[in-house]
Image: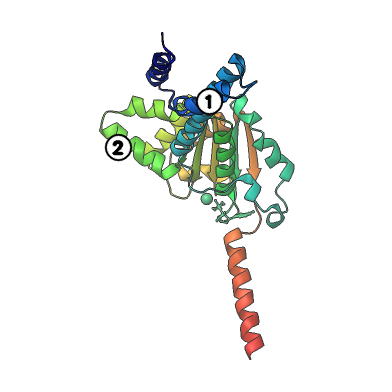
Amino acid sequence: MTPGSDYQRLRSHLAFLRMTAAAEALPGLLDQADTHTGGLGHQAFLEQLLAVEVTAVEERRKASLARFASLPSPFTLADFDFAAQPRLDRNLIAELATLRFVDDATNILLIGPPGVGKTMIAVGLGHAAVAAGMRVYYTTAADLVARCHRAALEGRWATTMRFYAGPRLLIVDEVGYLPLPAEGASALFQVVSQRYLKGSIVMTTNLGIASWGKVFGEDQMVAAALLDRLLHRSVVVNIDGQSYRMRSHRARAEAARKAVAAGA
Ligand code: ADP
Ligand code: MG
């Protein structure tokens, strides 16, 4: 066996195992192992070769989890300005950011008027979970309902239900902005039911729990049954401060007024 044919066989093993990063790093690592006096030993060589591949696979996996998650913005919890929301319990959000709630399938319900950062916190938790290697999926309630509606028409109901059951963390944004048709309410109910005690949901809503009946049209029973499962093991976070959007709007308006006053 010549060293040349050993090398070729090693390359083809790596190719067969689809270890492309290791294959690329191979010549360099072999040089280090061969040529340097006191170069890499067997163990160190093998460890470094595998480490290159492990890193590459991990990065691919993270990138694929991030794509799948469909998070609508890049903001993380570190970008959240707590000073703008003084009544929001910073320690509670920090505790949620540890993702311990995912381990026991606790749900998070973020309640508050528009612009207070509900989506930002939900998405921030999503990014944290992706970074921790979890499968996350973000959807708005409207998209979930539309997708379930199409699935029902096309005979893919069971597959679609499995899809929403799959992720470790499901984010359902903007429940309550639009009233749900009876069929939509029942789709959301089924998604919540089948994840019950199995997988966490982070849900955002502009409605206080007392007015959930309204989103579900006339069907108070579905609303009650859904809330029952959602809240059984849950953390409810009320964010009732000022809208952040309006805040920057106010700041710009204020600056414009000052500029006009200074000019006058
Ligand atoms: P909501 O979902 O409650 O309507 P969003 O999370 O969409 O509100 O927030 C509205 C906008 O304001 C977003 O661009 C968001 O990034 C920003 N924002 C809201 N609250 C904060 C905050 N406390 N710190 C930084 N940016 C914020
Ligand atoms: Mg929102």
Q: Residue extending furthest left?
A: 154
**Residue 259, horizontal then vertical, whole percent:** 63, 82
Tell me where residue 166 sits by quadrant: top left
**Residue 90 % position (x, y):** 72, 45
Residue at 54% of width from left, 35% of height from top? 130
Residue 74 in sight in this render: yes
User: Seen from this angle, which residue lies furthest bottom?
Assistant: 264
Report x, y in % for residue 114. 55, 55
**Quadrant in which residue 98 is drawn:** top right
Residue that label 1 marks: 31
Going 53% across and 21% down the picture, which residue do you hit?
50
Reading the image, the residue beneath label 2 is 150
Quadrant of the image for the C terminus?
bottom right
Judge whether 118 appears above or below 134 on screen: below
In the image, residue 2 above or below residue 218: above
Q: Is residue 217 visible?
A: no
